[in-house]
Image (tube, grey):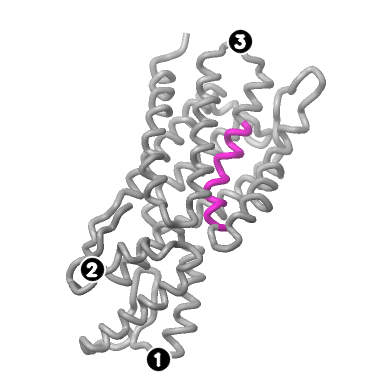
Amino acid sequence: MQSAAEWLIFIALLTCGLVLRPLWRSVAGTTLRTAVGWGLVVWAAWCVTWSSTLLIPNLSPGILDQLWYWTVAISVIPAMAVLGARRPGHGAWNFFVLVPLLLVLGWPALTVWTWQGPERLQIETPALIGFCLTILMGHGNYLSTRLALPALLSGVSVLLSLSQFSTTFGTTWLSTPSIRSWGATGIVATLIGVWIGTRPRPLTVPGAERVWSDFREAFGIVWAKRCLDRINQEFADRERWPAQLGPFGLEWTRSEVSSAERAHLEARLEYALRWMLRRFVDPPWIQSRLPAPGNPSQPGSCQE
């Protein structure tokens, strides 16, 4: 008999599908649609795997291992998709990087198939290291952003779920059913955290710095650092701005700056961001975060 906690996890997983609809809308006009699409696949995989674990008690252990392993492998792909979310190559990234990566991570599961079906699955230390490196690259991209906690929860859930197959750690410290329950719970917490972290914020700081802040939160620190460096090199240094663009906005190099200088720099920063971010977002995405024309004190309508 399945416990009430396991049924609660099942209901929570299904309910988390409601989170993905506003998330899909929030990335309209950006290249993050591919990452969110993979997120939909991850959610569906967890629902299928957990429901199979819960509702099909006579399912072959080898088949169940395959379901769990591939679900864990797919779970690292959405974060990796963000690292290729740059036009015009984001479509090619999907087919020439993400799909091969999934096959490489899934190779241990492919090697245990026989004519009689899959045998019980175990992975060696190199495979575990591969997952750790992938999580570090993809999930680490969201450190120091609003999605840092969901990224951490997702990475821990993946490694915890993977430990049921590991010959490095074994399962003596925690039973396989417990590992699976905690792993699924972590994914539920991740989806809730993503929903909270991507909810629209009031435009309390409209203007170019708001555009920069939202871009950094959405695309992570890797793309933010690359764009920041180019803007500083090609605009701030060349035009001798009295400020540099930092991770959290403009960092002024002089204590006294006139209102005219501030207005001019705001206009130049807006131009630089429009030019730099065109490979990531559509113009309406930027415009919705800028003051309405003719009324500098009021932001545009930020439709997420």
- Name the mark nearer the viewer: 1 or 2: 2
Q: Element at badge 3?
A: loop
- The location of residue 250, given as percent across then percent down, is 33, 76
- Which residue type carries mark 1? Arg
Q: Element at badge 2?
A: loop
Label 3: how many Cα within 10 Å (few below 14, some 14–19, many 20+): few
Residue 122 lies in the magenta-colored region = no
Can you tell which quarter of the image residue 175 is in? top right
Q: Which residues are magenta?
A: 69-84
Label 1: how many Cα within 10 Å (few below 14, some 14–19, many 20+): few
Whole-Å distance between the Cαs marked 3 and 2?
Answer: 61 Å
Which residue does the numbered mark 3 point to in the structure image? 58
- The location of residue 176, given as percent across then percent down, is 57, 24
Which residue does the numbered mark 2 point to in the structure image? 292
Whole-Å distance between the Cαs marked 1 and 2?
Answer: 28 Å
Can you tell which quarter of the image residue 108 is in? top right
In percent of the image, x 43 and y 31: which residue is there?
185
In percent of the image, x 46 and y 59: which residue is there?
220
Q: Earlier in the sequence, mark 3 or mark 1?
A: 3
- The location of residue 224, given as percent across then percent down, is 46, 66
The residue sitting at the top extreme is: 1
Q: Which mark is residue 240?
A: 1
- Name the mark nearer the viewer: 3 or 1: 1
